[in-house]
Structure formats: C-alpha cells, structure tokens
Amino acid sequence: GKGQYRHFMQKEIYEQPAVVGDTLHTFFNPLARSIQLPDFPFDLANISRLTIVGCGTASLAGMVAKYWLEQEARQLVEVDIASEFRYREAPLPDNGVSLFISQSGETIDTLAALRYAKEQGQKIISVVNVPESTIARESDMVLPTLAGPEIGVASTKAFTTQLTVLACLAIGIGRAKGTISPEREAELSSALTEIPSRITEILNTDEIIRKIAADVSEARDVLYLGRGNLYPMAMEGALKLKEISYIHAEGYAAGEMKHGPIALIDENVPVIACAPSGPMMEKTISNLQEVHARGGQIILFSDEEGVARAGDIAKHSVVLPRVDPFVAPILYALPIQLLAYHTAVLKGTDVDQPRNLAKSVTVE
Ligand code: F6R
C-alpha cells in the first residue's frame, strides 16, 4: 500500500535513500573503499564500443552513463533510443558490448533492440529491475537495480538505482582500463557512499519545491536547462513534467539556448536550470542572464555557492548539497521528481496513472 503517502510516486520518491543504498551495496565494498563488480563474461578493459539502449527515462540514464564512461573510463560509448535503434540496422563493432536499461525488463522496443544486437554478435548486459523479466533472461550478464516494485507510472526510484548501477559500472570499467587511479576511485567511492544521506537532505526541501510548483503549475511551457552530465537531467526534468502534469516542457543543453529556444522566452515561461557551481556554471550563468533580460522566470537548482553566484537573477532557488560533479545527476533527480510531483498534484492530475500512459510498454 501507500502507507502514509498520498501517491505511490511520492512513496517511491521517499524510498530512494534506502533503495539507492541497497543497490550501491551490491557493488561497493565500504572497507576497501572500492567498487566490486561481479565477473563479466568478457574483458571489461577491452570493449571496443559500449552501445547503450533504452526508452524514455531509461535512455536518459544511459545518456548520463555516457558522460561518466567517457570522462572516467575513456570508454567509447554510443547511446540510442530503442525504437530507433531496433530498425536502424546500425553496424556494430567487433568486440562490442551492448547494454540495455529497463525497469520492467519487458519493453518491446528495448527487447527487440537487444535481439538485434545479439544477432550482430554483441555481448549483452542489462540493467533491469525485474530479475525474472524477458530482457534479463536474454542477457549474458544482468546488473540488477534493487528498487523494489515501482507502481507509479513515472520512473523515480528505478531511475536513480539505474544511475547508481551505471556509476559503479563506469568506475569498474575505468579501473579495469587503468584510467581511474586508486585515489580517484576512493574519492568517487566516498561521493557514492554519501548519496543516500544527501538524498535525505534534499527530501527536506520538499516544502520549498512545493511552493515553486505553485508558479510552475500556472505555466503552459517550461524550459529545463543543464550542461554536461546534467544535460540529460534537463531532459529527464522535462519528461517528468510532461508525463504527470501535462505541461509542455523541453529539456535543452544550456549552450543550445541561443540556437533557437531563446525565441520562446517571455515572462510566462519558467526556465529551470540544473547548474551546480564550478567552471561550467559561468557559462550557464551567461545563458541565464539572457533569459533574465527577456523577462523569463528562472528557477535554479544549485548548491549554496552557485545560488550565491546567480544572485537575484533567479526568482526561486533550491539549495542542494555540494558534491563531486560525478554524482550530481543522481542528486539532481530529486528536485526534478519533487517539482513534477507537486506540480501535478496542484493541477489535480492522476499522478500515479497519467492519461495515455502504461507502466510497461509491451506493444509498439
Ligand atoms: C518515464 C517513464 C518511461 C519509462 C520507459 C521505459 O517516467 O517511466 O519513460 O522509463 O517507458 O520503461 P522500462 O524502463 O520499463 O523499459
């Protein structure tokens, strides 16, 4: 049941400190401060290219993983959505590995993409939440997410546990390839270990986010911006808003603003930026200044330093913990989920069963 919560989605958001912690502990040795992956049926140091495929939120987890794998493991990665990949007849490289991400493990496009990759001689890894699912059964190797049953149609805890598994995989591949030093691995390990308690901290901003949702619920269009590994999170933020609050939202790389979407900006368009402090924030600040100059309402998700840096160009800010940029996507998932949730509740939509959507898409 929903227990003390009003919706399954809300309950599942609040379960994240526990399920992310459980998932982390399957790969993480707190004593050795290192990631311990199970044995793979191929050499992790010698993957010519990793092809990551999924649908919707699962594909966005894959996009975050691309940033991690490229930066920390110098691994060549391609990410695609399953409905395109399955029909594209893309050539796949020798010694390639294909990775499929799916909560249900039954999504038809993802399964068809898996079968195509297998026929092309790729080794198959899957990150699934349902261990007895078809996608799990047809994989050479399964990395399970321990999210437990997800009832709400919108993916929340499945997504953050997918990210957790993928972060561990990126570190594992980096170690196998020798691109991650023991010092860096210890650093990343402690950043990962802190995630559950950081998530709990962010859940305490619930009330602030609910107030921001009052503004967002009035909007017809919303723009979500991010850079680097938070660019896929901007897309995830937009997807969540669309699916449960029915507000039109777009996720954009902040640097793409001036190549089109800036034309949309006026005082009626909230612009939500996922922008932790750091060298890249300066770039995002100048994008936000352009939004501000056109009367756009800025909502900033950042850390204390970033919020101070943005000053009064932001109408609303949510202060998140300052963390190693590697783990930021996992934490920024939280305000994204809470904002979509509260906006939907204020609009009176069916949060757990949004119109036209099914939890598991087993037909094309
Ligand atoms: C978004 C959402 C969908 C799913 C997608 C894939 O909140 O829930 O975009 O992520 O349908 O489903 P699975 O992961 O079951 O393959």
Image: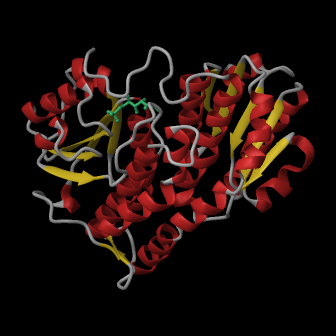
**Colour scheme in the image?**
secondary structure
Q: On the rendered structure, is 219 left or right of 355? A: right
Q: How many marks?
A: 0
Please tell me which residue lies in front, 358 or 167: 358
Please tell me which residue lies in front, 47 or 201: 201
Q: Is residue 139 placed above or below 17 in the rendered structure?
A: above
Asked which quadrant contains residue 173, the reply is: bottom left
Please tell me which residue lies in front, 21 or 115: 21
Q: Is residue 318 visible?
A: yes
Measured from the top left, where is residue 32 in percent x and y?
A: 35, 84
Residue drawn at x 54%, y 37% is 7
Q: Is residue 254 visible?
A: no
Residue drawn at x 22%, y 62% is 45
Q: Is residue 87 placed above or below 106 in the rendered structure?
A: above
Residue drawn at x 12%, y 57% is 42
Q: On the rendered structure, is 221 left or right of 85? A: right
Q: Quadrant of the C terminus?
A: top left
Q: Quadrant of the N terminus?
A: top left
Measured from the top left, where is residue 247 in percent x and y?
A: 65, 20
